Each structure stands twice: as structure tokens, then as C-alpha cells.
Amino acid sequence: MCGIVGYVGPKQATPILMEGLRRMEYRGYDSAGVAIINGDGVKVKKAAGKLSVLVEKLRTETPRGTVGIGHTRWATHGAPTTPNAHPHLDRSGKIAVIHNGIIENAPVIKKALQNRGHVFKSETDTEVLAHLIGAYYEGNLEQAVAAALWDVAGAYGIAVISADEPDVLVAARNGSPLLVGVGEGEYFVASDASAILEHTRSVVYLDDGEMVVLTRDGYRVRNLTETHVEKPVNQIEWDLATIERGGFAHFMLKEIFEQPESLHNTVRGHLLEEEGSARLRGLNLSDEDYKRINRVIITACGTSWHAGLIGEYIFEEMARVPCEVEYASEFRYRNPIVDENTLVIAVSQSGETADTLAAVREAKRRGARTIGLVNVVGSTIAREVQGGLYLRAGPEIGVASTKAFNSQVAALAMVALKMARLRSLSLLQGRQFIEALQALPAQIAKVLERAPEVEKLADRFAEAHNALYLGRGVNFPVALEGALKLKEISYIHAEGYPAAEMKHGPIALIDENMPVVFIAPRDAVYAKIVSNIEEVKARGGKVIAIVTEGDSEIGRLAEAVFTIPPTHDLLTPILASVPLQLFAYYVAVRRGCNVDQPRNLAKSVTVE
Ligand code: G6P
């Protein structure tokens, strides 16, 4: 979703801002722009479409200046046109604003300003904010921004510059991520660390209600009431190489191939082989706490929600604790029943998803224990939960989540293991589970070696218009995730179902043009799924099956089979999802789709 970058320092700002925007392209956007303090004015360049369009515009005239702001916009209010692109100017044309989020009372403020003669050039809430700041401006940008923010309701991350104060950049956050980059004699703001990583790894994460004033001499954080806030400077651990493609055609492919390592990193240091349990200090839960918990609620969105569904099977099966999985967007607006014995687990790659964050806040408000399984260090959810576990999967740039998904499943499995060992799981069962977890990285590597087989398969099915994914038990969520991967990046309509539910509807769709992907490892429901495959076969459907090595039965029914190594039943989703990720990837590539930045999708959904 929208990206913000800002610069104050000795260098030319435009190239730094453009590079920052390029690094944030993965978040998803549909227009882009920059504003630079240039001589005694503010020069704005913006364009609908991809960054390349803006680059073309800048070729004819690159604004010169050493203070500026840049933005990639993911349209919410108003179509993705050039007039709606950010930055927006105030009435004087001297103040420029970029904004992530939604100003909910913009229509009311707009009306009031129009009554005072303001004329607007765009349909955006951001232009309203720019005019409001301009209306408050009396020679001090910091004060004008603070005054305007008192009037607005909604979510924002903003960065503002003014031609009248050419050495100042003011930024603020309320509900949309924002950080300050602290360089040597230069300062940055960004919504995403990747935008500034080339220049500095020292960052200050802003919290809601905070503002920062950057000048050439330093930065100062305050809140809206003008109270100074002392903030720690954090060091980002990863470097530029980890957010570059490193020889892979796409980030998504690179991230799929990183899974042996990312999964190893997720479990590293957490597994207690002797005790058959897990050490998860960051969760801030005592053994007594684990025993007291009588209900687990996993809340998340998108792919993370699918990981949560797998978690539900693991929690209930191993820890024998009732577990529900709820879309965060539903949880936050219901009247959920939680108390101090409910453990609410927020699962999020970005740690910034607006609905998941709101669900965490709602759960906390009601007295539940909240923990987060989050990938991005320092993200808002990671900071707001009472305890947490970082996934350590490394930066995920491809919009379609792959390695983070499997790390989420592994993280959920470790929490379930820890809880299970304090309740119902024997030492030997615990040790077996750990052994299986530890074997996964090498097993994934084996699966990945056979990527060319999946590529061939994708060639055969790339022209399909629909696809059905079916699985049972813990592999039902894998079916959902496989279908989601395919539709996200290849735009083929795909649905995931529990295999037995097929008879209650989707079976009507099956014909000889419909690929049906079965996740059919040798587990407790194997015989049942073989019957379901027969049913599809009988209707002429083309079956692709993910089966366990050594399976000889399904091969005679399926058009194509792909084998995965045997593992603990509850961990098959981690292995089975890998060929499905590859399948979606290769199909999308065959269809000429933009794999890393699929249309309309955003990597980090910071608005509801
Ligand atoms: C977006 C992304 C998905 C992701 C979902 C939840 O829709 O495109 O890949 O699964 O948000 O994001 P989170 O960062 O909370 O895991």
C-alpha cells in the first residue's frame, strides 16, 4: 500500500527519493510523485501509472534541491489519476503533503474550506489536509501541521514540506507506519525501511500520535501536545542484498527458494530436543499462563489467516485446547467473547495490517492475552502485543506471501508444542514433532530441486480459466492457500474447498477443462481423499495431486502427481504448499503477469 519517503540533507533529493520509491514498489501502487524545495518554490512532479512514467517526466526536467518528499499511491479516495497522485499542494502552492491512510472527516473539512473560498484540484482527502495545513500556516510549519492534525479524524502517515521553510520536513503518524532514518548529516522519513536502507540502518520507529521535525542538523520527536518524546534508535539487521533479487527472475521465486533457510531461521534456537518442547521467551508467558489458557483465538488476514487455520488443527490436535481462527476484519467489529484466559494470537508478515492491528487492540481492551507472530521487526503489531515471536524469515518483497506463510505455520507449531507439552503431549511425541520440524528445511530443499517438474506442469495448465484446490484436515487450508496464490498472481479464478464439500456445489463446475489440485499425502484421511479423486475423475476433471513419496495408488487416477517427502501429519502443509507456490508462480509467468506486483494488490494493507 502507499509508500512515503522524505529527505533532508546535503545531497540532491530527487534521485534519493526515486530510489526509495523504487524500493517500495513491491508494496503495490498505481501512481507516484515527488515534491522538492527548489529555489524559492516547491516543484511537484507526479504521474499516474508505474514509476517508469514518472521517470520519463523527470527526464525532461529534474527538480533540483536537497529537501523533498516522494510518494507511491494505492488509490482509496479517487481514481488512480495524475491529479489525484501525491504530493498535493495547499492553496498558496508552497506547502506540499504526502499521505498514507484515510482522513475520515475530509468531506466536512473540505466543505468548510470551500466556504472560505478554497478550490480543490483532486478528489483526494490528502489535498484537503494540505489546504488545512496551509490555512493554519503562520510562519511555522511544525505548528501548522500539529494544529491541522488536531482537526482530523482517521489514519495517517504524512510528510510535509514548505517553500517558506526550506530546511524543514515535518512528518507525523497515526495508524500508518512511519520511521525516521538517521544518517550522517542527513535524515530521512519512510513508511518502510527498505526505502532508506541504502543510506542508513539506524532508524527510529514513530508511534501513533507522534510527530517528527527533521532539519539539516538533526531530528526531534514530539507528540501533538508539543511534549518532547525520547525515542530509541534501532539498528536494522538485514542489508541491501537481502532485498535484491540476487539472480532470480522475480522476488517471489527467490523467496520460494529461500524457504529452507527462512524456515531454519524461524525455528533456530527455539527447539528443546531433550524436553521435546520449545523455548519461546519473547511470548512473556509463564508455564502457569500456558496452563490457564482455555481458549486460543488466531486472528489474521489473507495468507496469514490461512496459516492460522493450519495452526487451529495443530493447537487442537496437540495441545487439546479449543482454537478458533477469525478474520481480523470480522473480529474487530463483532462482540467477541474473550477473557483473561483467552490467548489471542495475531499472525502478520508485515506487522502493519490495519485490521489485524485493530483486532489486537480490541482483544487487549477486553483483557485477553495477546501475542504476535510477526515478520517485520519493529512493526506496530510487534510493538503492541504483550509478547511475540519474530518469524525471522527475512524481508518478503513479492506481494504473494510464500516464505512468511511457512514460517508462520512453523511459529504456530512451536507455540502449540510448548502449550501441548504442559498439558497433553508426551515427551516422546514432543521429540518426534521436533525431529520432524528440524527435518523440514532439508526436505523443502529436496522439493525445490524438482521445480522444473512443476514448471512443466504449469505449461500444461497455464490456459485454464478456473481451478479447484481440494484437501482434507490440516491440508484443507493448504487448498485455500494454493488457490489464493494462483488467483493473486495469475488472475485465474481458483477456489479452495475441503475435499468432501466438493459434492455440495463445486462438483457442478467440473469438466475436462477444469484442473483439480488435490493435496493428498498419506495421512489419516488418505482413503477418503482417494474416493474424492475418483469422483472428480468420473466427471472428466483433470487431477493434479500432491502425494507422499512412494504413493502408487493416486498415480493411476491423476493426470499428474508431484511427490513430497513424508513428515509428521500436522506438518505436511509446509511441504505441500511449496509445489503449489511454484505452480502459481510458473503459471503466472507463462501468462505474462507481473508476478511481484499483481494488479490491485498491496503487500501491506494499512487501511481497512
Ligand atoms: C495482503 C498481502 C497478503 C497478506 C495479507 C496479510 O493482502 O498481499 O500477502 O497475506 O495482506 O498481511 P500480513 O502482513 O498481515 O501478513
Image (spheres, rainbow, N blue to C red):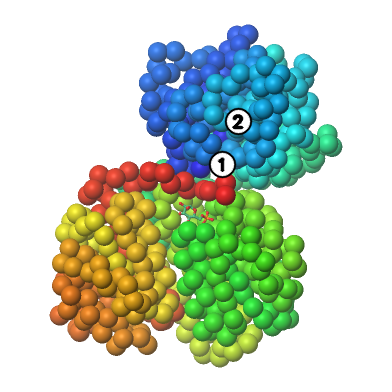
The image quadrant of residue 197 is: top right
x and y percentages locating residue 64 in the rendered image:
53, 14
Q: Which residue appears at 23% of the width and 48% of the height?
A: 591
The location of residue 367, given as percent across then percent down, is 75, 68
Q: Residues within 10 Å of mark 1 (few under 14, many from 20)?
A: many
Element at badge 1? helix
Q: Decide if residue 515 is on the left or right side of residue 318.
A: left
Q: Mark 2 points at which residue?
A: 126
Q: What residue type is labelled 1?
A: Ala
Instruction: State the residue at coordinates (61%, 63%).
Output: 331
Q: Is residue 499 left or right of residue 171?
A: left
Q: Label 1: which residue?
A: 193
Q: In front here: 508 or 564?
A: 508
**How far across and down, in percent of the image, does residue 124 sit?**
56, 31
Residue 66 is left or right of residue 436, and the answer is right
**Most foreground residue, 51 or 493:** 493
Image position of 11 (left or right of 52) = right
Q: Nearer the viewer, residue 222 or 534?
A: 534
**Element carrying mark 2:** helix
Label 1 lies in ligand 1 vicinity (Cβ under 8 Å): no
| Disc 2 residue type (three-letter) | Thr
Q: Say which residue appears at 57% left-offset and 77% top-offset.
A: 323
Q: Distance between the residues labelled 1 and 2?
A: 23 Å
| Above or below 447: residue 103 | above
Q: How far from the left and from the top, in percent, is residue 315? A: 55, 79
